[in-house]
Amino acid sequence: MKKINRRECITRLAGASVLMGTVGHQAVAGTKVTAPTTTTLGRTGIKTTRLAMGTGYHGSKRQSNHTRMGFEKLVDLFQHSYDRGIRFFDMADLYGTHLYCREALRSIPRENVTLLTKMYWQYDSKKPAELPADYKYRSANKALERFRHELNVDMVDIVLLHCLVNPDWNSEMQPYMDALMEAKEKKQLRAVGVSCHNFGAMKTAVDTPWVDVILARLNPYEEKMDASVGEVVALLKKAKAKGKGVIGMKIFGAGTLLDKKDECMKFAQTNGVFDAMTIGATTPGQVDENLALMAKYPVV
């Protein structure tokens, strides 16, 4: 009789439980749990899955609900997501999830997944305009070196400047941008960009040639968003027309719209602006439910 290891046992049991509708949340009735479709992020050339495994639910101070699960559960969640076909992992220095992903990459082939992380400039100062340019530049270099070490990789696929709120960020962030662009030229990363928490900052991102990828908050109920649905969609269409990759976040309003998941996923799949989306599921059942909902509303 063939022996199986602990991880294989967990994966098989999880798969069996999903078929029985017993892992975490039940799969959507009448909908098959299938792997997410593949997408290309703008003109970056990066091909990955339309769904990313988010790791920053209630993330702050290098912690999140994901890290609070502990190493074993979070590493197993990475593996479960991978086993379900997800090939896109969304992390951040702010969430403290690099080392957990590093552990998962012991069994997940690095070349099969897209790794996105975010550089939190506020660790240097909440008033970056007051910092010397050379300090910002050195800080960005050291942070990226640390990210690569924590993940145990030579290259990170995507690095974003995290949580931009100033419409004039492209001026005060220039040294960080220079450092990341040099790293891109050295093939230490493949694409750069921003996550926006301000509509003016998002407008600047759309008009800034340096930006390859934009992480934007968008859902049909305007929860945790930066402007109205119409305004955000129109702006992101402009971003796509310029070849930028668009990744959606706050799909379920940071947990405030869990009773409206069906409507939210339908919107995310049909709004015409997302290349991909990131959702911070914290159980295997939630991962499967999200995949089932995506399959229910395929992108045309």
Image: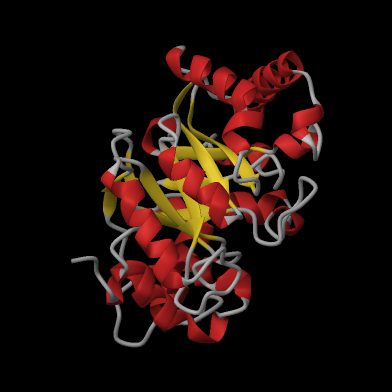
Q: Looking at the picture, does residue 23 appear above or below residue 116? A: below
225 with respect to 99 (left or right): left
Residue furthest to the left:
300
Q: Of residues 65 and 83, which is closer to you in this image? A: 65
> In the image, residue 144 lies at what x, y percent?
63, 24
Nearest the eye: 77 or 228? 228
The picture places residue 126, in percent across and down from the top left corner, at 80, 40
Residue shown at 76% from the left, 17% from the top: 135
Query: Quick check: can you spot residue 117?
Result: yes
Could you say which quadrant of the image residue 145 lies in?
A: top right
Residue 27 seen in the figure? no
Q: How is the image coloured?
A: secondary structure
Above or below for 182 versus 291: above
Query: Which quadrant of the rendered structure holds the C terminus?
Result: bottom left
Which residue is depicted at the point 81% across and 35% down? Answer: 125
Residue 89: image location, x then y, percent: 50, 46
Vertical side of 223 occupied by 112: above or below = above
Q: Name above or below for residue 39 compared with residue 122.
A: below
In the foreground, 201 or 114? 201
Question: Can you give x and y, in whole percent of width and height, for residue 201 in the image?
Answer: 56, 48
Side of 120 relative to 290 (left or right): right
> In the visual, does 178 lie left or right of 38?
right
**Number of marks present in the image shown:** 0
Horizontal side of residue 248 vs 48, given as left or right = right
Residue at (53, 72) in percent of width and height: 252
